């Protein structure tokens, strides 16, 4: 019952909240995400039972268990279940230059005190770099809508603000961030960065290269885990890059877990300090939703970005993050 009340509140917010409403005197750029019309529902697919594809999708799939039946240990006992695979919308990100602006929640602003603002690219400074804040929301849409009923096969709970970069001292300090990504010095060479061209081509074809984990394909480098980007010529590309970095950062900190599409291993979730990029997709939901498609990490925006990157906005963006889920259905 609790999640139905939450869904009703979200829908009412979408229908009723206007820019000139109660938050207008303390509002930034943003709009409420409609959990029905703004979501690319075909991005749930491909859906599999073991290695059998039950429903196909536009984008390629990752590996799945060979057997549809899995015997999983539960303490000293075992349980039998069906190994299913699907793509789960599990999080949203705000990307903003203005601290505290909750882009995906109507644009209202949280007073975070003396927090540094972001900055833009070539128009704002001699160097073409930028800085963005990122907010990570827990967004268990599958659970709310009862699309899958096995609790072990989806993220549960309510919509929640899970991470605010404004209160993280590592997000705006590249030196301090080396505490959690000390390997950054290994991948700053021209040779390592040049390899990212291959990752960009692979992502454009539908699947990024997991061995090149330091690459964000067409967006540049995953390192460092901060909101700074260099050579910003497209705010849209920069916003996608910092969202992908935040996903990697949360993997590194153990706040996002990973499932594995292999026999027996599919029974559990695991920490993954190196992000499996091929198991992630993103979809724009703010400011201009793209409910017709989602994109692999590192893929170029050239084919769809021109209609979603208005020069008149405050450069605030929102993304729905899709993650491949392999689990054992009871």
Image (cartoon, rainbow, N blue to C red):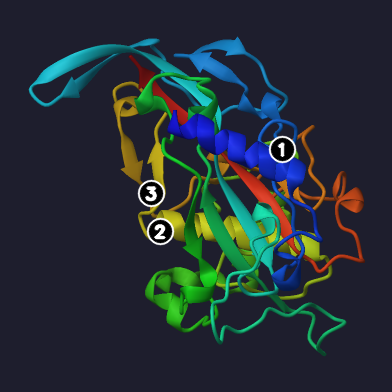
How far apart marks 2 and 3 lie (CA) works out to 7 Å
- Left or right of 228? Residue 247 is left
How far apart marks 3 and 1 lie (CA) works out to 23 Å
Neighbour class for label 2 at 10 Å: few (<14), some, many (≥20)? Answer: some
- Please state which of residues 198 and 263 is positioned toward the viewer in this rendering: 263
Say whether residue 108 is visible: yes
Q: Quadrant of the N terminus?
A: top left
Which of the 4 image quadrants contains residue 219? bottom right
- Residue furthest to the bottom in view is 126
On the image, the x and y values in percent for residue 328 come to: 35, 20
Residue at the (70%, 61%) spot, across then down: 107
Residue under circle 2? Answer: 252
- Please state which of residues 273 and 249 is positioned toward the viewer in this rendering: 249
On the image, the x and y values in percent for residue 6 come to: 53, 38
Which is more N-terminal, label 3 or label 2?
Answer: 2
Residue at the (48%, 29%) spot, across then down: 143
Image mark for residue 272: 3
Which is closer to the viewer, label 3 or label 1?
Answer: 1
- Please state which of residues 133 and 158 is positioned toward the viewer in this rendering: 158
Residue under circle 1? Answer: 294
Q: Secondary structure at mark 2?
A: helix
Is residue 218 depicted above or below 261 in this figure? below
Which is more N-terminal, label 1 or label 2?
Answer: 2
Q: Quadrant of the C terminus?
A: top left
């Amino acid at each position: 019952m609790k999640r139905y009340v939450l869904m009703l509140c979200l829908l009412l917010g979408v229908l009723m909240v206007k820019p000139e409403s109660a938050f207008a005197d303390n509002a930034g750029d943003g709009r409420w995400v409609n959990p029905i019309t703004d979501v690319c529902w075909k991005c749930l697919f491909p859906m599999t039972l073991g290695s059998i594809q039950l429903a196909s999708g536009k984008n390629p799939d990752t590996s799945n268990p060979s057997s549809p039946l899995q015997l999983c240990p539960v303490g000293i006992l075992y349980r039998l279940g069906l190994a299913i695979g699907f793509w789960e919308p599990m999080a949203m990100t705000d990307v903003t230059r203005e601290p505290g602006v909750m882009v995906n929640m109507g644009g209202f602003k949280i007073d975070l005190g003396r927090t540094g603002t972001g900055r833009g690219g070539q128009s704002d400074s001699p160097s073409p770099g930028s800085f963005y804040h990122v907010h990570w929301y827990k967004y268990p849409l599958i659970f709310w809508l009862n699309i899958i009923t096995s609790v072990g096969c989806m993220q549960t709970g309510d919509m929640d603000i899970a991470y605010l970069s404004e209160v993280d001292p590592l997000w705006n300090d590249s030196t301090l961030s080396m505490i959690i990504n000390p390997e950054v010095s290994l991948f700053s060479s021209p040779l390592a960065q040049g390899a990212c061209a291959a990752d960009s081509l692979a992502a454009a074809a539908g699947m990024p290269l997991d061995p090149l984990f330091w690459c964000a394909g067409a967006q540049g480098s995953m390192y460092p885990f901060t909101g700074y980007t260099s050579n910003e010529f497209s705010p849209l590309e920069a916003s996608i890059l910092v969202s992908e970095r935040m996903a990697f950062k949360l993997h590194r900190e153990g706040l996002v877990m990973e499932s594995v599409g292999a026999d027996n291993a599919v029974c559990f979730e695991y920490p993954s300090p190196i992000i499996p990029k091929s198991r992630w997709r993103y979809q724009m939901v703010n400011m201009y939703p793209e409910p017709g498609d989602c994109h692999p990490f590192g893929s170029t925006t050239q084919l769809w970005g021109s209609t979603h990157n208005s020069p008149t906005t405050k450069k605030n963006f929102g993304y729905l993050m899709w993650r491949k889920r392999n689990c054992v259905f009871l």
